[in-house]
């Protein structure tokens, strides 16, 4: 009887050692010879790559009126057509115009001549979809020449005067686009696709199912 009682702790200890253990994790079966391994869509080189977006710079454009008058020449019309498709104009911000003349007339006449040229450009832009409240026009007359109006001997410099008859357009740009406005980087696109893709149920190791 005493021997049976003495053996009882050993029996209990042996029973504790035989407690159920979690089965080993299944080993993935090897691929058949010659079968390429499936590549992960989360490539490390793509996950860190970023698609750089070139900043939009302010736009400067000069519409020349080399023959005088206020009718926009063909070359100027072609410039304005391209101007309408620029990213600076697409931002919807203000557009500033400065109108200029040569020094052939009086100050008052030159201001009036430059104003007519500026108004011709403004009217064209409005007719082609630019809101008028985006446009600001200043007529400078002969104040800001880009070329000499006269030769050293005092005679008219016709080429210089032709260059001075112009309308300058300046389009400032907004600040750099925010995270909501800019295009997503390639890494962000991959992460978004991974997070939104439907997920299959996680497999349960054999012997760990719970019963109700």
Image: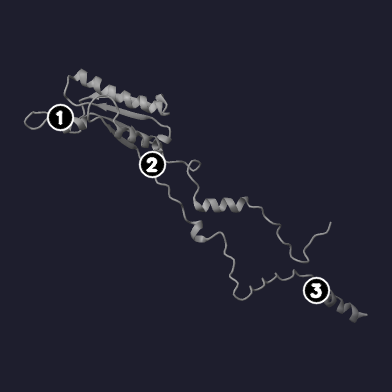
**What's the mark number on residue 117?**
none
Report, in whole angstroms, how far the alpha carbon at label 1 lies from the one at label 2. Answer: 35 Å
Label 2 Cα crowd, 10 Å radius (few <14 / some 14-19 / many 20+): some
Residue hosting label 2: 56
Residue hosting label 3: 18
- Please tell me which of labels 2 and 3 falls first in the chain: 3
Q: Please, which residue is most extreme toward the front here?
A: 74
- Please tell me which of labels 1 and 2 falls first in the chain: 2
Using the rendered view, name the quadrant where residue 66 is placed: top left
Q: Please, which residue is most extreme toward the bottom here?
A: 3
- Helix, strand or loop at disc 2? loop
- Please tell me which of labels 1 and 3 falls first in the chain: 3
- What residue is drawn where x is 76% and y is 66%? 206
Label 3 Cα crowd, 10 Å radius (few <14 / some 14-19 / many 20+): few
Q: Is residue 157 left or right of residue 165?
A: left
- What residue is drawn where x is 20% and y is 31%? 162
Q: Please, which residue is most extreme toward the left here?
A: 153
Q: Please, which residue is most extreme toward the right here?
A: 1
Residue hosting label 1: 149
Q: Is residue 132 left or right of residue 28?
A: left
Using the rendered view, name the quadrant where residue 14 is placed: bottom right
Q: Position of residue 54 (x, y in %)?
A: 40, 46
């Amino acid at each position: 009887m005493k021997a049976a009682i003495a053996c009882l702790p050993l029996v209990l200890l042996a029973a504790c050692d035989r407690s159920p253990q979690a089965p080993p994790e299944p080993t993935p079966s090897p691929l058949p010879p010659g079968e390429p391994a499936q590549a992960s869509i989360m490539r490390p080189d793509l996950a860190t790559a970023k698609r750089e977006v070139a900043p939009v710079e302010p736009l400067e454009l000069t519409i020349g009126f080399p023959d005088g008058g206020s009718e926009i020449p063909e070359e100027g019309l072609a410039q304005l057509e391209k101007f309408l498709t620029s990213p600076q104009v697409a931002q919807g911000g203000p557009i500033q115009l400065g109108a200029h003349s040569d020094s052939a007339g009086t100050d008052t006449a030159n201001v009036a001549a430059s104003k007519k040229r500026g108004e011709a450009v403004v009217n064209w832009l409005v007719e082609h979809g630019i809101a008028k409240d985006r446009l600001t026009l200043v007529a400078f007359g002969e104040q800001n020449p880009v070329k000499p109006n006269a030769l050293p001997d005092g005679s008219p410099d016709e080429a210089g005067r032709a260059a001075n008859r112009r309308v300058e357009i300046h389009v400032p740009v907004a600040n750099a686009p925010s995270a909501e406005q800019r295009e997503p980087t390639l890494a962000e696109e991959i992460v978004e696709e991974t997070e939104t893709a439907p997920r299959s149920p996680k497999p349960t190791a054999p012997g760990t199912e719970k019963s109700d």
